[in-house]
Image: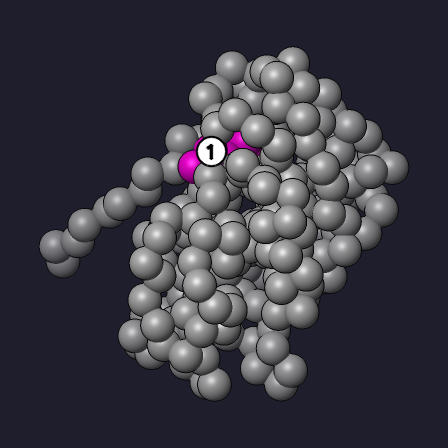
């Protein structure tokens, strides 16, 4: 057996109704930014449930709902600018892997100089090291399979390049895996997502590590 080390500082809550934990966990005082995409998380009431739960704990929230299925560097930049302008205290990635990956990148851009692509080790990325810890990240997946709620990596698209990036400063602070937020996804799609990402995401992470 090979020796290995495992580091996962994320505090993860699993179970039906576990989103209610947000009313009790410790987050910085101030406004949170819920980062999501499309209209489904709003129509299904997930955005309202998260916002209401955070409000119980005294955290007002704003919503950025422009994340694309394959998140782009332009979206990351726009969302990060909103974070800075509104003095956001923490971010919530709500949705599939795209929303959570965007939240991770935004959290770093909000506290570090330059652009997210400056910290990409590969392609046209700048290859810089992240100096400052990002904003606290809450990850709430509404699909199964990506695993991004439990790792420190992202996959962002910049033009023709789609590159994994991240590092220890990108781990979610808290992850809420609440099956109640996943029941509207058909069972066969949940199975496809899990099988597809079980092969694709580790490869993206491996390529990112090889480029360091």
Q: Quadrant of the N terminus?
A: bottom left
Q: Is residue 159 left or right of residue 165?
A: right
Q: In this orientation, does residue 194 appear?
A: no
Q: In this orientation, does residue 169 appear?
A: yes
Q: Which residue is mark 1?
A: 174
Residue displayed at 75% across by 33% down: 47
Quadrant in the rendering for residue 182: top right
In magenta, the rendered stretch is: 173-177
Residue 30: x %, y % from top left: 57, 29
Q: Is residue 46 left or right of residue 13?
A: right
Q: Is residue 2 left or right of residue 101?
A: left
Vertical arrangement, residue 166 with respect to residue 125, above or below: above
Task: Please count the marks in the image.
Answer: 1
Q: Is residue 67 left or right of residue 101?
A: right
Residue displayed at 47% across by 85% down: 124
Q: Nearer the viewer, residue 174 or 183?
A: 174
Q: Nearer the viewer, residue 21 or 79?
A: 79
Q: Quadrant of the C terminus?
A: bottom left
Quadrant in the rendering for residue 186: top right
Q: Secondary structure at mark 1?
A: strand
Question: Any magenta on residue 91?
Answer: no
Vertical arrangement, residue 161 with respect to residue 58, above or below: below
Residue displayed at 62% across by 64% down: 77
Q: Nearer the viewer, residue 181 or 57?
A: 57
Question: Any magenta on residue 174?
Answer: yes
Q: Nearer the viewer, residue 189 or 81?
A: 81
Residue 171: x %, y % from top left: 40, 47
Residue displayed at 32% across by 66% down: 129
Residue 107: x %, y % from top left: 51, 50
Residue 94: x %, y % from top left: 65, 41
Q: Pointer 1: residues within 10 angstroms few (<14), some, or many (20+)?
A: many
Task: Name the dominant secondary structure of the magenta segment.
Answer: strand
């Amino acid at each position: 057996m090979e020796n290995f080390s495992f580091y996962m500082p994320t505090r993860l809550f699993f179970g039906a109704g576990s989103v209610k934990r947000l009313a009790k966990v410790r987050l910085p005082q101030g406004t949170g930014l819920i980062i999501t995409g499309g209209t489904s998380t709003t129509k299904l009431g997930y955005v309202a449930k998260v916002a209401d739960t955070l409000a119980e704990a005294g955290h007002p929230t704003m919503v950025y709902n422009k994340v694309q299925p394959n998140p782009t560097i332009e979206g990351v930049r726009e969302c990060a600018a909103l974070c800075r302008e509104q003095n956001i205290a923490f971010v919530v990635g709500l949705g599939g892997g795209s929303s959570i990956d965007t939240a991770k990148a935004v959290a770093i851009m909000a506290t570090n100089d330059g652009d997210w692509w400056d910290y990409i080790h590969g392609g046209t990325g700048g290859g810089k090291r992240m100096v400052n810890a990002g904003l606290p990240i809450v990850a709430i997946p509404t699909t199964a399979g990506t695993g991004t709620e439990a790792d420190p990596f992202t996959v962002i698209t910049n033009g023709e390049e789609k590159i994994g990036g991240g590092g220890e400063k990108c781990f979610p602070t808290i992850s809420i895996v609440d099956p109640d937020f996943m029941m509207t996804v058909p069972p066969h799609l949940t199975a496809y997502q899990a099988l597809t990402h079980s092969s694709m995401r580790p490869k993206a992470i491996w390529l990112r590590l090889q480029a360091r």
